[in-house]
């Protein structure tokens, strides 16, 4: 995935920034636009637009976002208003709370997924998942 490929669907908002390999962050990070992380982080991520955890990301904590794309490692709780996308080389453990979850072949997800309804009054459906797709 190109960092700033403006033709991609996930890049509808303005880029707010990124954390490059070699950076370590502990705490809370808030972003109003598209933000990419390719570093180590422990804490809370809050994103109003698109949050991308790149292939080199190692994140532990919580994500409160809209559209979350994971290509690296994540351990914790994800709450998304829109969509969570777990890409082929990603390893995700923990909980996902979202109305839409996409897990690509080859991705690893070990945890529980709470599929939220289109209205807040809907009761969520909880699906325990442990998936390790065979790599060709």
Image (cartoon, rainbow, N blue to C red):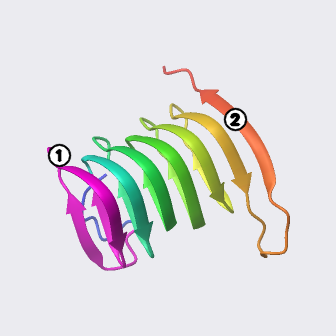
Residue 102 on image: x %, y %: 60, 50
Q: Is residue 45 above or below residue 6?
A: above
Residue 123 on image: x %, y %: 85, 63
Quarter residue 31 falls in? bottom left
28 inside magenta stretch: yes
Nearest the eye: 22 or 10 = 22
Which label belongs to residue 10? none
Q: Is residue 81 above or below residue 13?
A: above
Give the residue at mark 2.
129
Quarter residue 112 falls in? top right
Element assignment for label 1: loop
- Point out the tag, 2 or 1, that comes first from the N-terminus: 1
90 inside magenta stretch: no
Q: In percent of the image, x 80 and y 59: which residue is there?
A: 124
Element assignment for label 2: strand
Number of marks in the image?
Answer: 2
Give the residue at mark 1.
21
Residue extent of the magenta highlight: 11-37
Q: In percent of the image, x 24 and y 59: which residue is there?
A: 3
Q: In percent of the image, x 66 and y 30: which residue is there?
A: 130
Residue 133 on image: x %, y %: 58, 26
């Amino acid at each position: 995935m190109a960092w700033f490929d403006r033709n991609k669907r996930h890049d509808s908002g303005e880029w707010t920034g990124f954390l490059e390999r070699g950076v370590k962050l502990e705490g809370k990070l808030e972003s109003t636009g598209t933000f990419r992380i390719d570093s180590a982080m422990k804490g809370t991520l809050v994103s109003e637009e698109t949050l991308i955890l790149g292939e080199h990301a190692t994140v532990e904590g919580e994500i409160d976002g809209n559209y979350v794309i994971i290509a690296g490692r994540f351990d914790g709780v994800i709450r998304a208003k829109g969509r969570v996308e777990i890409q082929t080389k990603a390893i995700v453990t923990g909980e996902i709370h979202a109305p839409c979850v996409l897990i690509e072949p080859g991705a690893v997800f070990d945890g529980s997924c709470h599929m939220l309804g289109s209205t807040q009054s809907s009761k969520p459906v909880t699906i325990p998942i442990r998936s390790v797709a065979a790599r060709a």
